[in-house]
Image (cartoon, rainbow, N blue to C red):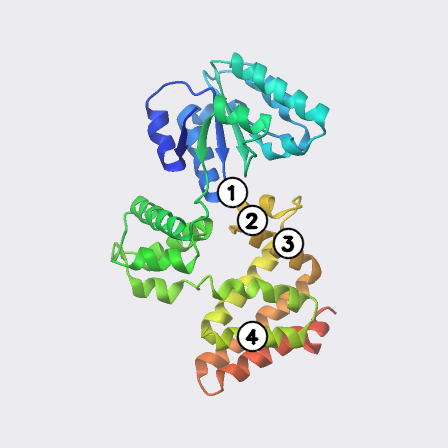
Amino acid sequence: MARISANELLSRLEKGKPIPAILLLGEEPYLRDRCRTLLIERCVPEGARPWAVSRYSADRGGTQAAIEQAQTMAMLAPLQVVFLEDAEAIEKFGEKNREEAVDQLTAYLEDPAPFSVLVIEASQLDQRMKWGKLLAEKALVVECGLGENLNERQAAAVALARAMAKEQGLEFERGAAEDLAEFVAADLMRLKTEIDKLATFAAGRKQIRREDVSALVVSEKTTTVWELADLLASRQGKKALEFLNRLLRDGEEPLQMLGAITWMYRKLIEASEVKGVVNGWQAARALGMRPEQAELALQSARKIPKPRLLAGLGALQRADDHLKGGREDARTVMEFLVTELTGKEALAARG
C-alpha cells in the first residue's frame, strides 16, 4: 500500500474512503501523537471515545486481543479505532510466537472489519522480514520520522514550526523559524513546547521575531548538559569541571548554560515523580522530551534523591543572581556551582 507523510494523513482521511489498517512508522513522538489525535478526532465522535478507542501493546502480548477487538463492533459507534503499539517487538519473538502473530494479522487483513481502523505503531521495522513485508503491503504506511539527513530534518522542522505557529494565529519573522529549528535540533516535541512559550511572549504582536527566539530558547547544543547529569549524580566533580570547561571553550554562554542546567534539574524532578514507566519511550510524552533524553532523565533521577535536586535548584538560583549581578567572573561562578552540586553541599542535602 502507499506511503505518506504524517502531514498528508489529514487529506487522506478527508477523502472519506475506509482505511482498514494504518502503520505509524517512525521514532518521532510528536508526529505519532499528532496522527493518533487526528485519527481519533476524525473517526470517533467525542462521546463514543471511551468505548470506541482501545490500546494494546504487542510487547505485552496484546496482538491477538487487538485483532479480536477490531473484529468486535463497538457499542453505540459506527467506527472504532484500535491501536496496537510496540509492533517492532514481534520481530524479536521466538519463531513460533512470531509466526502466530503474523498469521493472525494476515488473516485479519485478508478480510478486515468494515467498522474498525486498526492502527499499528512501530519505531522501525525490518522490511526484509515477513512481518515488515506484510505491513508494508497491506497497511497504509504513515511516516512518523524526519529521516536521517540533517538538512531534510531541518527543513521539515521549519515547515512544522510555521504550521504550529499558524495554528496559534502567529507567523515567524524571516529567519526566526530556521533559528528555532536549529536551536532545538529538530526535536518536534520541544519545538511545540517552545512555540507555546514564544506565543505567550509575543501575545499582541502576532509575530515571533528572531530576537524572541534568541532570548527565550536555550540552544540544543547547550542541552548536551544531559551528559553532565550522570557526572553530578555520581559526584564526579573533576570530570564535571572538565566538561564545563570544554563547553566554555566551545563558546557556550554561561547564562545560557545555567538556564539549560536549571531546565535539566526541573526535568529530573519531574522524572522522579513519573510512575509506572520503565523506559524513555514511555516517559517521552510525560516529560515532553525526546525518548533518548527521557531515558537519561529517568536514569539520573533514580540516582539523585529529590531533596538533593531541590537543594540544587537553590544553588542554581544563587548562581543566576551572581551572573546577572555582573560583579563576579562568570567562569568562577560556574565552576563554584559545579563544585557545589557535586560536593559537600549536595551531600548534606541528602539529610
Q: Amino acid at mark 3?
A: Leu
Q: Amino acid at mark 4?
A: Leu
Pointer 3 or 1: first along the chain: 1
Looking at this view, is 40 or 351 the one in front?
Answer: 40
Q: Which mark is residue 27?
A: 1
Between the residue at mark 3 and the residue at mark 1, the CA separation in whole angstroms equals 19 Å
Kindly check if marks 1 and 2 are in contact, taking CB atoms under 8 A apart as contact.
yes
Kindly check if marks 3 and 4 are in contact, taking CB atoms under 8 A apart as contact.
no
Relative height, residue 232 to residue 287 (above, below):
below
Pointer 1 or 2: first along the chain: 1
- Of circles 3 and 2, the one toward us is 2
Label 3 SS: helix
Between the residue at mark 1 and the residue at mark 2, the CA separation in whole angstroms equals 9 Å
Q: Which residue is mark 3?
A: 298
Pointer 3 or 4: first along the chain: 4
x and y, in percent, of residue 27 in the image: 51, 42
Pointer 3 or 2: first along the chain: 2
